Image (tube, rainbow, N blue to C red):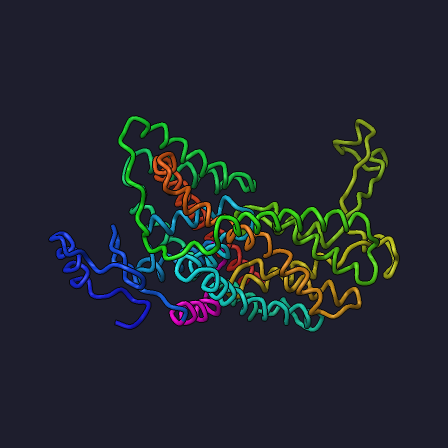
Amino acid sequence: PGPGAPRDASRGLAGGASGAGGGGAAAGAGKEEEGDAGPYAEVGFGDIFRQFVLLGWTAFGGPAAHIGLFQKVFIERLKWMSSPLFLELFALGQCLPGPTSTQVSFAIGLIKKGIPGGLLSGMLFQYPGLVMMSLFGWAADSIDFDLDVVKGLVAGLSAVGVALVVGAAVSLSIKVCPDRETRFLCLLSAVLAYMYQAAWLFVAVIAFGGLVTCVRDREKPVKEAPGKEGIESLGASKITGAILIIIWAAVLTSVIILRNTLPYEGVNRGLYWFESFYRSGSIIFGGGQVVLPLLLNEVTQYEYVCQDSSALPSPTPAAATGSNLCERVPDYLLYPKGDPRIKSWMTEQQFLAGLAISQGMPGPLFNFAAYLGAVTALGAGQNAVLGVICTWFGLFGPGILLIFGVLPFWGSFRKLPIYRMALPGLNASAVGLVVAAAFQLYDTARRARCLFLLY
């Protein structure tokens, strides 16, 4: 078999038998590791390039579909790592600020070939959507986003994403939910994540799942620390990881202070754009859908317009009390074009049009930031490239810094007994999030189809 694919299973079994006899299976750098789902494939930079350069152009359907696609390709087909390890990476991404599927894409390359491998896998996964959304932002004024072909494309790609997520949810739930408690945690996580969209919920349900199995297994012998399970590198040292985390916090603090100090004019505009997106990327958990309301409030400013309810015809609920009725209105609708009181960087229509087309683009939904940056910069009379750099790096930067900074510590933490007890619950709750995503994506695809048929 070629590089990046698991070798013959019989060869792995023979190696295991010879190891049992005292000679040992092949050891050392570059050899596969045998485990519960081993042997795991040898992976080089060429393998990472070949897989991710294709995924970057074909990974449609949003973050949940991306996780399902990674599971199909790297766990089931290529055997790059074990299913439990993949779920650990997924759960870690859910517990860190930033886009989960993006963090997992960087982590897959990192655990195989270190920091260069992580940068290679992550950037190959991002760049097609980045390029296309930048171009759409640059040409936004001349594109008709209401064309039937655009609506039909979004509806069809959403349907494909549903199939990927459902397949991943079924496969993962069978593997990591073998008993009553883990099935209950998976169900609870799925129901809560489907019914409530609060950003903190992703972290809370995963932590609760770990706590439940910690309590359940407190009297049982602790499972042995995991083997490599496909891990060949953790990237940076712990010192470097700590420096990356400090850099993330220092940049966040600095840009917030500078924005509140400097006026919005000239080159300072780029600072404002970067700060808005960097701050948003630092406080959201779970993925692209969670950050959309935050981004809308950053690029479009609103004012409340009130009128005396007593002047309204009865029956009006507020009229009986003489209170005012207030409506939240974008500021660009209240003042003449060019008025300095208008603080919005774009209109709601421009935002929603870009969101619609981003649903049909491959790669992370966070690439929507490139479109927003281009439109914002052009509206301010600046080069579109400047806007793309400020917004795209601003939104992606926190999640990338944190995944590279945290993984060296996670490599040691995952061997602790308490983590081993918590792991079944952590993984079961993480799978519940995938199950919830399958239903949410189905709802999205159904709405897209209905809009296509109606309009």
Tell me: 322 left or right of 12.
right
Q: Main secondary structure of the magenta part?
A: helix
User: Hey, which quadrant is residue 326 in on the image?
Assistant: top right
152 left or right of 433? right
Residue 50 makes an appearance in the image? yes
In the picture, the quarter occupied by the C terminus is: bottom right
Q: How many marks?
A: 0
Could you tell me which residue is drawn at 14 percent across and 56 percent down?
Answer: 23
Answer above or below: position of 332 versus 306. below
Magenta residues (range): 46-63
- Tell me if residue 71 is in the magenta stretch: no
Q: Residue furthest left?
A: 21
Name which quarter of the figure residue 112 lies in: bottom left
Residue 297, image x, y percentages: 70, 49
**Measured from the top left, where is residue 306 in percent x and y?**
83, 40
Q: Residue 77: in sight, yes or no?
A: no
Task: Please name the residue shown 44% across and 39% down the image.
Answer: 206
| Residue 55 lies in the magenta-colored region | yes
Residue shown at the point (80%, 27%) measured from the top left: 321
Q: Quadrant of the N terminus?
A: bottom left
Q: Quadrant of residue 454?
A: bottom right
Residue 72 coordinates in the image, percent (x, y): 35, 59
Left or right relative to 337: residue 425 = left
Residue at 73 percent across and 62 percent down: it is 376
Residue 400, position in %: x, y?
55, 55
Considering only vertical position in the picture, is 410 above or below 352?
A: above
Q: Is residue 170 above or below residue 12?
A: above
Q: Nearer the viewer, residue 453 or 11?
A: 11
Return the residue nearer the eye: 206 or 311: 206
